[in-house]
Image (tube, rainbow, N blue to C red):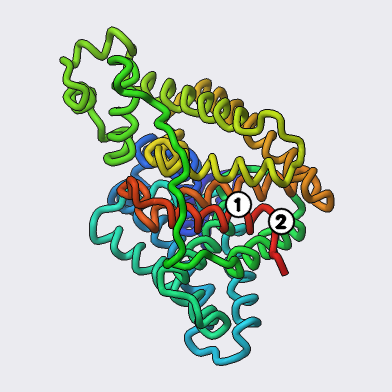
Amino acid sequence: MTTARGQGAAVVRRRPKDRKEQIARASAEAFSAQGYHAVSMEAIAAKVGISAPALYRHHASKYELFRDAVLALGRALVDCTDFVDTNDGDPDETLNRLIDALVDVTLANRESGGLYRWQARYLHGADQRVLGDQLRMVNRRIQQPLNVMRPELTSPQRWMLSAGMLSVIGSAVDHRVQLPSDEIRALLRSAARAVIGAELPGPQDTFARPSSWRVFEVDTGVYEALLQASMVLFNAKGFPATSMAEIASAVGIPVSGIYRYFPGKCDILATGLRRAADRVSGRLSATLSGLTEPGHMLTLLIEAYVATSFANPDLVAIYYTERVNLSRVDQELLRSVQRATIDAWMRLLAAARPSLTKTRARVLVHAAMALVVDVGRLVHYEHRGDNSAYPQACVRKLMEATLFGSAG
């Protein structure tokens, strides 16, 4: 508490009672929007309206702030689902309560929820394990009523369904599509129920491996090889932790050789993401040549999108995790390309489901696309190679459930 002299009277300035909450909220939103490495303690202090030394009295380091913000989001998911451990009621009602609770927590943290989804890679080992334990607990709670409702499911199928449901709900933090709160809640609830009720193919089923292609062809020259190697490293280590020397070594050229093609590391990231988005968009558009029925067109798009994502897992993940490291101009350019792709899918979905407004359709398209990353990570699609036909079939089913709704 401090005092200041006014006109003959002392003015008492009291520290707000919710100062810790202000700091937690400001840091979570900053880290989510800009990424861990781009945020400074000074910027967080300014956002809260205090000095940097005052902030250090609450938190010893930026990492401590970051860790607390990420784990608080994980804890919120755990806390909102804890009723399941003592609940023995109707499993269908329990599942509805779980969905409602998770949707409410997600929307309450929409400005910061991207932190645990896409920036948690920067947690230290022990803290990563804590977050992993939190998310596994939430998944297992979702699976409790699912075990009763669908006892025929295998353990991997249950994990795909619970992870898919969490992904659809969590996708609300990945975009800024605006809908009235009641509408977006109802939309996410419906999509979550459709995903958790999806009929996945059986492990014994056989599938032809869908045709796929690499976005960057390393055999065509150093330029493409640099883009491909960079994307792999950015995904494995994170953009800030990847050095130009590591990129050069991966391609087998001296560091000076990179500068014949790119002015710097940021230019590699921006070029890679833009070219990938352009190429994927063009490839998907070619898939629809000569077709006119919206539902069939979307089904073919889903198959091509999943196959391309499994063949290029680094690019799909980097779009969500590393785009915060682009300049504002490059971020906007990338958004423009991505927006065009979302628009194309949205128009097809709105035509296939006339009851959906275009805005609602856009939300569902974002949710379906996020599924590929979230469930892909669960099945380790970056290591699948030729063994990806079955998990791809499962992801296609989850995307179809998200976009087209429950078959029942």
In this picture, residue 21 sits left or right of residue 256 = right
Is residue 314 shown to the viewer in this render? yes
Query: Residue 146: percent from the left, percent from the top?
Result: 53, 78
Q: Which residue is mark 1?
A: 172
Which residue occupies 39% across, 47% down? 119
Secondary structure type for disc 1: helix
Q: From the viewer's side, name the closer residue of 272 and 311.
A: 311
Disc 1: CA contacts within 10 A as few (<14), some (14-19) or many (>=20): many
In this picture, residue 170 sits left or right of residue 345 = left
Tell me, yes or no, whether the two marked residues, 2 and 1, touch with CB atoms within 8 Å: yes
- Which of the 4 image quarters holds residue 268? top left
Is residue 51 shown to the viewer in this render? no
Indicate the quadrant containing the C terminus: top left, top right, bottom left or bottom right.
bottom right
Secondary structure type for disc 2: helix
Query: Residue 94: percent from the left, percent from the top?
Result: 60, 81
- Which of the 4 image quarters holds residue 321? top left
- Which of the 4 image quarters holds residue 349? top right
In this picture, residue 124 sits left or right of residue 254 = right
* Residue type for callout 1: Ala
Q: Please identify the residue farthest to the top as the structure is shown.
A: 260
